[in-house]
């Protein structure tokens, strides 16, 4: 999706001002298959770019979700905590996971835009 930034670990971030809204990509939710549990991070927790922020559990595996940028977690998606299937149904909308107050906007430069992420996925498929 255009307007988002992506990690190689298949997280996305949408930046609105100093806030980053984070989720996992459609590719990630599809690879995991049915997500049965989301262990959301605590509000107020500081996270570092590329480090584990939370865990999602699917019928297939347990996977870390990494912070695409560093900052403080200011909001979590309680809906996704109660009904983790929402992550499968709407990974870019209602299935967002948490929001971060971005500490260093220059870190966004290390992430891929939609076109680069599509290319990355195509390369991974071969």
Image (cartoon, rainbow, N blue to C red):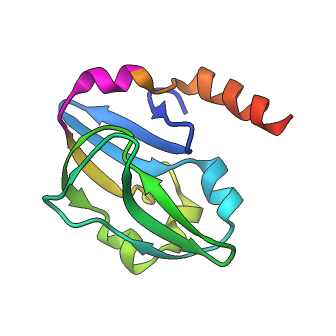
Whether residue 93 is visible here, answered yes or no, is no
Q: Nearer the viewer, residue 88 or 28?
A: 28
Question: What secondary structure predominates along the stretch shown in magenta?
Answer: helix
Which residue does the image show at 61% across and 21% down from the upper left? Answer: 115
The residue sitting at the left extreme is 44
Q: In the figure, is residue 81 to the left or right of 28?
A: left
Q: Quadrant of residue 58?
A: bottom right
Q: Quadrant of residue 83?
A: bottom left
Return the x and y of residue 87 as percentages of the image width and height: 51, 63
Which residue does the image show at 53% across and 57% down from the upper left? Answer: 90
Q: Is 47 situated above or below 108?
A: below
Q: Is 119 situated above or below 100?
A: above
Quadrant where the C terminus lies? Answer: top right
The residue sitting at the right extreme is 126
Return the x and y of residue 80 as percentages of the image width and height: 40, 69
Whether residue 81 is visible here, answered yes or no, is yes
Which residue does the image show at 42% across and 23% down from the upper left? Answer: 110
Quadrant where the N terminus lies? Answer: top right
Q: In the figure, is residue 7 to the left or right of 19?
A: right
Q: In the figure, is residue 38 to the left or right of 28?
A: left
Return the x and y of residue 7 as percentages of the image width and height: 50, 36
Q: Is residue 17 magenta?
A: no
Q: Is 28 situated above or below 123?
A: below
Return the x and y of residue 75 as percentages of the image width and height: 21, 58
Q: Which residues are magenta?
A: 102-109
Number of marks drawn: 0
Q: Is 21 situated above or below 64?
A: above
């Amino acid at each position: 999706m255009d307007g988002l930034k992506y990690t190689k670990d298949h997280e996305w971030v949408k930046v609105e001002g100093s806030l980053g809204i984070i989720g996992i990509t459609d590719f990630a939710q599809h690879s995991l298959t049915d997500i049965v549990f989301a262990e959301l991070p605590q509000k107020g927790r500081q996270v570092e770019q590329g480090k584990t922020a939370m865990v999602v559990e699917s019928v297939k595996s347990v996977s870390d979700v990494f912070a695409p940028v560093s900052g403080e977690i200011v909001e979590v998606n309680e809906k996704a905590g109660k009904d983790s299937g929402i992550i499968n149904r709407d990974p870019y909308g209602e299935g967002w996971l948490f929001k971060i107050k971005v500490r260093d906007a220059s870190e966004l430069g290390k992430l891929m835009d939609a076109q680069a992420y599509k290319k990355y996925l195509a390369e991974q498929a071969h």
